[in-house]
Amino acid sequence: MNTWTVERAVEELRTAESARTARHPFTDDWPGLDLGTAYRVQSDLVAARVADGERIVGVKLGLTSRAKQRRMGVNAPLTGWLTDGMALDAGTPVPVDRLIHPRVEPEIVFTLGRRLEGPGVTPTSAMAAVRSVSAGLEVIDSRYRDFRFTLADVVADNASSACFVVGDVEADPAGLDLALEACVLGVAGAVVDTATGAAVQGHPARALALAANSLAERGLALEEGWIVLTGGMTDAVPLEPGRPITGEFTHLGTLTVWS
Ligand code: 0L1
Ligand code: MG
């Protein structure tokens, strides 16, 4: 008999996070976990954080680049939630004592000047809602062993969210070609990867439109003032003690995280 429920999955993910113990993906023994149910798990997971005092500050997209999709073996993008409890001030070490196996990836981040609601959002109408664009580094941390998961598993796990840093450059997107905005990713001073914004769905505006349209399928919208992480431009790299990770962007500044 299948005893899996949304409530049980939420409990298991919260336990994995607080005990810092990765588990096997739900779909190993819950093959019927579909995307609709996985998004209900995700929603209840973030509701539990809000009940604990956190506030939703935006949305993240995941698996929007081929580099990420190839590495994770999952060929579709997804969305997850960001809370103020996940935000790190630049200059603050990553709280690795709360994480299982953190990895870091560079992202282009939008801040919304007005509400953006799908369906039917296009890259152009999405950009009309953007107040500013910034650099970001996302620290991801899967609650699944070895980051092994299906799309439904990673949706349930709030897209491997852990922490994020947003840079203090708040650029007017009208002045930038975000498809050409480049990032050089370095670990301990050595370049390990590079990408431009075009890696993210061809243009990060497409990822923003995708987020709005995907939320609309669940009766939700992106709210004024929220930030949107548009997804890792490159593959994520492991965060190791004493090996700072730096994302150096062409126009959006340079960010470093370390533990
Ligand atoms: O663990 C993962 O790689 C899934 C989250 C994807 C994050 C991203 O592509 O930005
Ligand atoms: Mg990411």
Image (spheres, grey):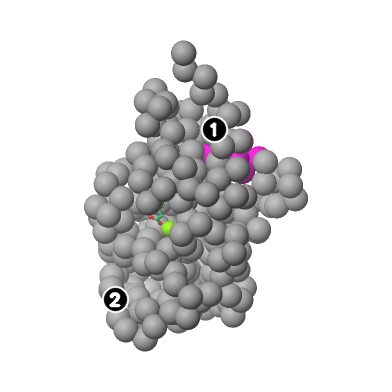
Residue 55 against residue 51 in the figure, above or below: below
| Viewer-proximal residue among 211 and 79 | 79
Q: Secondary structure at mark 1?
A: helix
Residue at 44% over, 46% down: 144
| Cα gap from disc 1 to disc 2, whole angstroms | 36 Å
Dot 1: within a 10 Å radius of its alpha carbon, few (fewer than 14), some, or many (20 or more) residues? some
Based on the picture, tell me whether residue 144 belongs to the magenta stretch: no
Q: Secondary structure at mark 2?
A: strand
Q: Position of residue 179 (x, y in %)?
A: 30, 67
- Contact? badges 1 and 2 (CB < 8 Å): no
Q: Which residues are magenta?
A: 42-47
Q: Which residue bears the numbered disc 1?
A: 9
Side of 176 where 8 appears, left or right: right
Residue depicted at x 70% and y 52%: 54
Quadrant hosting residue 114:
bottom right
Three-letter code for the amino acid on which mark 2 is drawn? Val
Residue identifier under label 2: 192
Identify which residue is drawn at 38% across, 74% down.
176
Q: Position of residue 252 (x, y in %)?
A: 44, 78
Residue 97 placement, left or right of 157:
right
